[in-house]
Amino acid sequence: MNIRQAKNEIKHTVEAYLKKDEAGDYEIPEIRQRPVLLMGPPGIGKTQIMEQIARELGVGLVAYTITHHTRQSAVGLPFIREEEFAGKTYSVTEYTMSEIIASVYRRIRDSGQREGILFIDEINCVSETLAPTMLQFLQCKTFGNQKIPEGWVIVAAGNPPEYNKSVRDFDMVTLDRVRYMTVEADYRVWKEYARAQHISGAILSYLELRPGNFYRVEADVDGMQFVTARGWEDLSNLMAVYEKLGFLVDEQVIREYIHHADVAEDVAAYLDLYRKYQDDYGIPQILDGCVRPEIYARIYAAAFDERLSVVHLLLDGLAVFFGRAASERALTDAWYAFLKEYRRQVETAADPAECYRTLVAEREQEMLRQIANDAYTREEAKREKLLMEKLKAAQQEVTKDSAQRCFEAAKVGFDRQREVLVQTEEAAGAALEHAFDFMEQAFENGEEMVVFVTELTITSESARFLSEHTCERYLTYNKQLLIGTRRAELLSELRRDN
């Protein structure tokens, strides 16, 4: 299965294990809740999907890479206590609580989340001294003499032997007590995640042209050469910051993330071209509706790689507009929900200004709790902090007065935010129309238009924008190019050209 299928299956498993009956007991008894054992190559996103599942289900997550542990930290330290048996006193060895089990209880205490996921990575790469402990963990759901707390689902992950020489095979007894899932690298599935995480458009454009380089593991005389999904994502994060600082990402930097000499060299050459295309074609000017005549002459004569790169540069530029619109929409909606609740309470409040301050304080406490529980994505946390700043700023205007006047004062900043949202969405709509102007003139309804419309359709922020704002040309091309045999023919032509 691919990583998306694995995520869905694990999510369903957690939901099933945590389902309770009318008496409040788990529908599937704890003894029948088999741990999930997820096997797949390194760097494809196993840890990320666990974070997503926990966030989406609103449960806790404690994650450990077991190779970082010794037997003592996993099992606990021995100590001696005395017990009496049949009238005689004996010294008995017991163990302190495992660090891992303690972390689960600590999470319950600090977050209030009594249910969650205990995720153990690289479980089949442990040392010989720790191997029996891991088998006991999977078979009995214990570390040493300590059980995993009720309501916590075990998910473990490991790497197949072809990727790690130190892996250990599980015996039949263990495998008969787990849910065994195998996951493989899949660029098309990862691409959806990459778009949502705003992975560099240059990297995604490169991988569209060279999808075979997405995940590669090869052994030669010089040792292991490899490229992983984790490498692409980490490189993208560095590139974004380097760009802000004005630093150059050259081949040496790329080799630090892409551990395959040929691929790293190829990526470096492509990034140079990508930057050159961005300057030569003037993407910001195209999206502003100002296209120099010589640009069309160049694109008509360009090779496939260059044409497709320009399409992705346009999509990158549009993504900035759509991202701003999505952020402003989310902020506006959250602010509206707050004001709606204030409007409901202020009508009967003895002190309208104090009512506002109380609601702001409650929202801030909830925000801090959610951040502490890792319940927000990075974007959600950023939005909540920004909203809190704006709500606190409005507090100065909400003074002792009538309920209506206090509400109007609280609403002043929101009205300005609505204007910002309208302007942002209008700018995004205009940029999209200008992009279609260029696409029609440069490519008509060829393969490049298929790529353009497909990316608009499957990328979450653009798809959301298009669902809320009508673009007639998008609807027309979507109908003409992305249905039936016409789409298959054009995509087939695109693959042949590639």
Image: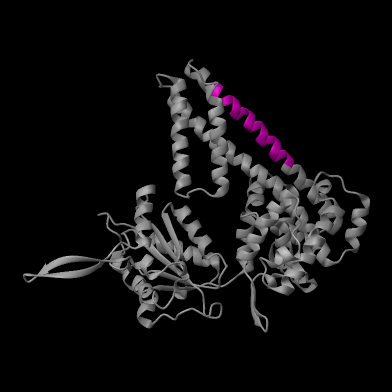
Residue 60 lies in what quarter of the image? bottom left
Relative to 187, 145 lies left or right:
left
Q: Is residue 322 above or below residue 41?
A: above
Q: Residue at x 31, y 59 (%)?
A: 149
Q: Main secondary structure of the magenta part?
A: helix
Q: Is residue 422 magenta?
A: yes
The answer to which of 392 and 469 lies nearer the viewer is 392
Residue 410 visible in rendering: yes
Q: Is residue 99 magenta?
A: no
Residue 423 lies in what quarter of the image? top right
x%, y% of residue 371? Answer: 48, 45
x%, y% of residue 10? Answer: 45, 64
x%, y% of residue 210? Answer: 73, 70
Q: Which residues are magenta?
A: 409-427
Relative to 134, 393 lies left or right:
right
Looking at the figure, which quarter contains the C terminus? bottom right
Q: Residue furthest left?
A: 87
Q: Is residue 344 above or below residue 403?
A: below
Residue 199 visible in rendering: no
Q: Residue at x 68, y 81 (%)?
A: 222
Q: Residue at x 68, y 52 (%)?
A: 241
The answer to which of 86 and 242 lies nearer the viewer is 86
